[in-house]
Image: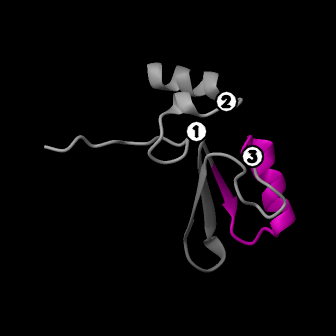
Amino acid sequence: MLNQIIHNATITVQLPWYLNANAEIAALRAAGIPVDELGSATSGYLFVRTTGRGNHRTNTFRWFAAGIGQTFAHAATSGSQDQEQASAA
């Protein structure tokens, strides 16, 4: 039997779909997600999913500090203490 690995996002942010790129980048940075001027993660892995219809669309951003398939101990992030506390719970 294979072991199932479940990855919990370090930070999850849900933003309105209609935000312009500058507002979106500012919101991601304010939440603690390291993104460059284009909105790409500078470390870890950033997953984005759009849900909803019409005027009720949202973008859900999930940032994984260590990336997918890596252990958190190998990532050098400022939120490592938060992740350790969350995994202990």
The quadrant the C terminus occupies is top left
**Do the CB atoms of the residues marked 1 and 3 lie less than 8 Å apart?**
no
- Other residues around mark 2 within 10 Å, as few (<14) / some (14–19) / many (≥20): some
Highlighted range, magenta: 13-33
Find numbered disc 2 in the image and state the secondary structure of the residue it sits on.
loop
Which residue matches tag 2? 79
- Other residues around mark 1 within 10 Å, as few (<14) / some (14–19) / many (≥20): many
Name the residue type under label 1. Thr
Q: Is residue 3 visible?
A: yes
Q: Is residue 81 above or below residue 36?
A: above
Measuring 58% from the left and 38% from the top, which residue is drawn there? Answer: 10
Q: Position of residue 16 (x, y in %)?
A: 70, 64
Q: Position of residue 60 (x, y in %)?
A: 60, 58
Q: Is residue 61 left or right of residue 9?
A: right
Name the residue type under label 3. Pro
Of the two numbered discs 2 and 1 on the same chain, state the one appearing first in sequence.
1
Which residue matches tag 1? 10
Question: What residue occupies the far left of the structure in this picture?
Answer: 1
Of the two numbered discs 2 and 3 on the same chain, state the one appearing first in sequence.
3
The quadrant the N terminus occupies is top left
Q: Is residue 63 above or below residue 51?
A: above
Q: Position of residue 65 (x, y in %)?
A: 60, 40
Q: Is residue 15 above or below residue 34?
A: below
**Disc number at residue 34?**
3
